[in-house]
Image (cartoon, rainbow, N blue to C red):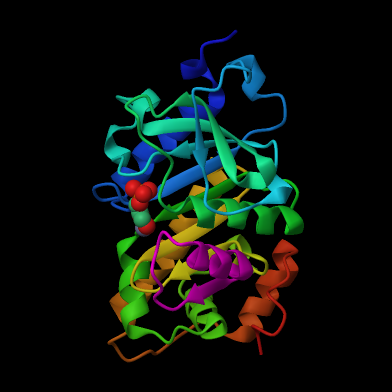
Amino acid sequence: MKDILNAPFVTEMIRTTASMYGQGWDERNGGNISLMLDRGQAEEYVDPGQVLRTIPTGFSAPELEGRDFLVTGTGKYFKNVRYEPEADLGLVRLTEGGTQAQLLWGYSDGGSFTSEFPTHMMSHAARLRTDPENRVVMHCHPVNLLAMTYVHPLDDRAFTRTLWQMSTECLVVFPDGVNVLPWMLCGTTQIGEATAEKMTTARLVVWAQHGIYGAGRNLDETFGLIETAEKAAEVYLKIAHLPRLHTITDEQLHLLEQRYSVRARPGFLD
Ligand code: 13P
Ligand code: ZN
């Protein structure tokens, strides 16, 4: 059995949580990540017959039956994961239609997975239907996107178009755009269902007055997705109160589609 602390999925998770903290996206215990492992990956590091604890999930997710996830713990500080990975992370296997999570490693101080576990698992299920290669769901509280939800209409198309206009690379990085949920109570199955619904059409879902969710094929790609949207939101907040002399036009956005072989979300460009 190999040492799980050297597993690429653990070391990449540690690097990612540290980077996210460095960006200021994850104050205190803010933010959470879940990474779905490939089948058979966990067995290189843990014995699935040795279940440390079984934790009820409070929802069902039959599509994720038997799948393994590395998940940040609830109440854990991203700034600390590198120093205490075994307490701050957990490796769980979903069983009994996703209603139970078998703890195979981690949460060594008696902790549990993030309070946003319903949103993570439901979003994984939704993204996997669209993209079987999806592996990551990431949540954080980036300041500019958060601030933007106080002053910008919370309409998916309008919010997306504003971000696309704030930096040339946005349309190329997230051609599927950004979906937006109004304020809802976090940590619930209801916000999980609503987020998963929004995840069927975009890999980014903004939670108004709270933060953002990103989904992707690996940790770097998902981090980069949020990073790009957050930078666009920063530009927006720098210019929103100034007279707009120039913008990126829809005609120019169509040129980007052609040059980079991407297709903007249908109906989002004029
Ligand atoms: P957790 O500490 O339970 O992951 O919650 C942090 C958070 O960002 C809630 O939305
Ligand atoms: Zn949050």
Q: Residue drawn at (33%, 84%), measured in percent from left and top?
A: 151
Whether residue 169 is visible to the viewer of this picture, yes or no, is no
Direction from residue 146 to residue 121 in the image, left or right:
right
Q: Residue drawn at (60%, 46%), measured in percent from left and top?
A: 99
Give the quarter of the image for residue 14.
Answer: top left
Residue situated in front as seen by the camera: 8 or 117: 117
Residue situated in front as seen by the camera: 258 or 99: 99
Whether residue 88 is visible to the viewer of this picture, yes or no, is yes
Q: Residue drawn at (36%, 43%), measured in percent from left and top?
A: 74
Q: Residue drawn at (48%, 39%), measured in percent from left and top?
A: 71
Highlighted range, magenta: 177-198
Vertical arrangement, residue 219 with respect to residue 207, above or below: above
Instruction: Examine the structure image and report whether residue 269 is included in the region drawn in magenta.
Output: no
Give residue 45's position: percent from left, percent from top: 58, 16
Vertical arrangement, residue 151 with respect to residue 190, above or below: below
Give the quarter of the image for residue 94.
Answer: top right
